[in-house]
Image: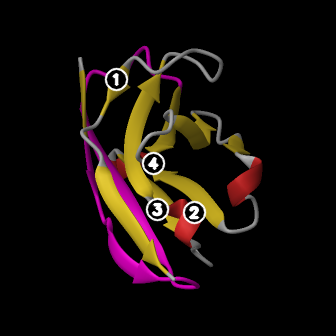
């Protein structure tokens, strides 16, 4: 089992920055990728960025050049640095752990709200 806890969400003005953190605990032997998803009201939950154990990163087109995903294996923590935030980035952001980069998430955090005001 893997437990994931997100933090770092909040209210920010357009153009601002936030850094989300995801603290992981449990047994990671089968986890080979972790990612950030987001879900806006009335919309589906979409992948924003993910990073594999080898460090390969993927970004959705909508956040390329603005968001950076990283991980600190010593701290079992993953980060999402978000810059140049836009109102369309407003959503609940979820941390997820996956068995591989192509699979659906096997574990989810409870989410953290990010609100970008115009």
Q: Earlier in the sequence, mark 4 or mark 2?
A: 4
Q: Are marks 3 and 1 in contact (CB under 8 Å)?
A: no
Q: Please indicate whether residue 78 sits to the left or right of residue 4 in the image.
A: right
Which numbered disc flags the more N-terminal residue, 3 or 1? 3
Q: Nearer the viewer, mark 3 or mark 1?
A: 3
Percent position of residue 44, x then y = 51, 33
Point out residue 116 in the picture as x, y percentages from the top left corner: 45, 74
User: Which residue is the site of mark 1?
Assistant: 107
Callout 2: SS: helix
Mark 4: few, some, or many residues within 10 Å (few <14, many ≥20)? Answer: some
Mark 1 closeness class: few <14, some 14–19, many ≥20 residues within 10 Å: some
Disc number lying in front (2 or 1):
2
Magenta extent: 5-32
- Are dots 3 and 4 in contact, CB under 8 Å? yes
C-beta proximity under 8 Å, tags 3 and 2:
yes
Q: Position of residue 59 (x, y in %)?
A: 70, 47
Q: CA distance from mark 4 to mark 2?
A: 9 Å
Label 3 Cα crowd, 10 Å radius (few <14 / some 14-19 / many 20+): many
Q: Is residue 75 magenta?
A: no
Badge 1 marks a residue whose secondary structure is: strand
Query: Alpha-carbon distance for marks 3 and 4?
Result: 7 Å
Q: In front of the other: label 1 or label 4?
A: 4
Look at mark 4 in the image and give the residue it sits on.
40
């Amino acid at each position: 089992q893997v437990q994931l806890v997100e933090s770092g969400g909040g209210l920010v003005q357009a153009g601002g920055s936030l850094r989300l953190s995801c603290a992981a605990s449990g047994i990671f032997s089968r986890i080979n990728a972790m990612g950030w998803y987001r879900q806006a009201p009335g919309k589906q939950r979409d992948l924003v960025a993910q990073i594999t154990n080898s460090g390969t990163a993927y970004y959705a087109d909508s956040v390329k050049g603005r968001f950076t995903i990283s991980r600190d294996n010593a701290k079992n923590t993953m980060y999402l640095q978000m810059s140049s935030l836009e109102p369309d980035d407003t959503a609940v952001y979820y941390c997820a752990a996956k068995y591989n980069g192509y699979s659906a998430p096997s574990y989810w955090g409870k989410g953290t709200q990010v609100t970008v005001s115009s």
